[in-house]
Image: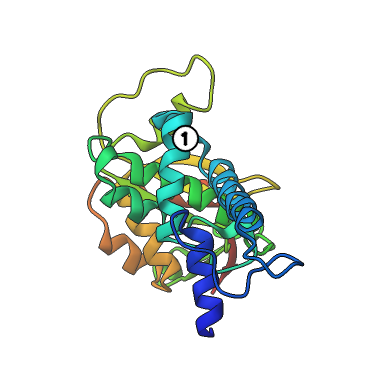
Amino acid sequence: MSVTQRQFRDAVLDPAAAVPDGIVNPDGATAGKRFDVYRNNVAVNLSDALETAFPVVRKLVGDAFFRAMAGVYLRKHPPKSPLMMFYGAAMPQFLGQFQPVKHLQYLPDIARIELGMRQAYHAADAVPVAPDALAALAPDALMGTKLRLAPAVQTVTSDFPIAAIHYANTVPDAPKPVMQPEAVLITRAGFDPQISTINAAAAICITSLQEGQSLGQALATADDSLDLGAVLGLLLAQNAITEIY
């Protein structure tokens, strides 16, 4: 990036910055008003992209607060891609360090869910195994078996009831969340991502499988609260297993 390009980018994201050299009207005068309009349009479009990407976070903090917070975010984290559907990847980390929302300790994990759902939506398609594929394995071979999971599969683990909070802010008349740790599994069985509530042991197991560990190794990473049969049943039901090897 040349000095001129860097100055232009910095000036676009900083409302107090001077108009970069070379930005002029047809008469040769500095194009201050035109640049201000362009700068404002950039900020508005980036803020709109963040509102679209994080609707539950926006609902939790309120529209006006979110808009102001988005203004801070976009100046700290300008886009790295022209594809706005991927903008906001640093939001969970940003929320964890943004002092005005420090009291909402669950907020970064809610952002991780929304980010994960967006990534799952745009993940590559994958062909699932047959529902009875695991049942066909010999019992003594099961623990040495490895599973390849669909690209859309993700987990989020939290000390807070993130599934219940997300549900309460997306479904009318949903029950009030009970303050307890929760984890979620994000899958995309069809066209749209889905959230399933799981426990931390299940999330650890699924992550281990994603890392290439066998079922036996994944089982060993979790504690006694893991119900391996339930985890495998959920993955199969959500078309999340694409290969058994």
Q: Which residue is drawn at 66% across and 57% down?
A: 130
Q: Is mark 1 on a helix, strand or loop?
A: helix
Q: What residue sits right under mark 1 in the picture?
A: 58
Q: Find the residue positioned furthest to the bottom.
A: 2
Q: Residues within 10 Å of mark 1 (few under 14, many from 20)?
A: many
Report x, y in % for residue 155: 42, 53
Q: Which of 202 and 194 is in front in this view?
A: 194
Nearer to us in this view, 125 or 148: 125
Residue 38: x and y, percent? 64, 55
Pinpoint residue 151: horizontal percent, then vertical percent: 57, 64
Q: Residue furthest top?
A: 173
Residue sitting farthest toward the right: 26
Amino acid tagged 1: Arg
Q: Tell which of 1 and 194 is nearer to you.
A: 1
Left or right for 75, reference 81: left
Q: Nearer the viewer, residue 152 or 106?
A: 106
Residue 199 percent coordinates (x, y): 33, 43
Q: Is residue 92 visible?
A: yes
- Residue 132 seen anywhere in this rendered image of the structure: no
Numbered-mark total: 1
Residue 103: quarter of image: top left
- 29 vs 234, left or right, is right
Q: Image point 33% across, 57% down: which residue?
A: 204
Q: Quadrant of the C terminus?
A: bottom right
Query: What residue do we see at 70% from left, 47% from top?
Result: 191
Q: What residue is rendered at 56% in x and 77% in y? A: 5
Q: How is the image coloured?
A: rainbow
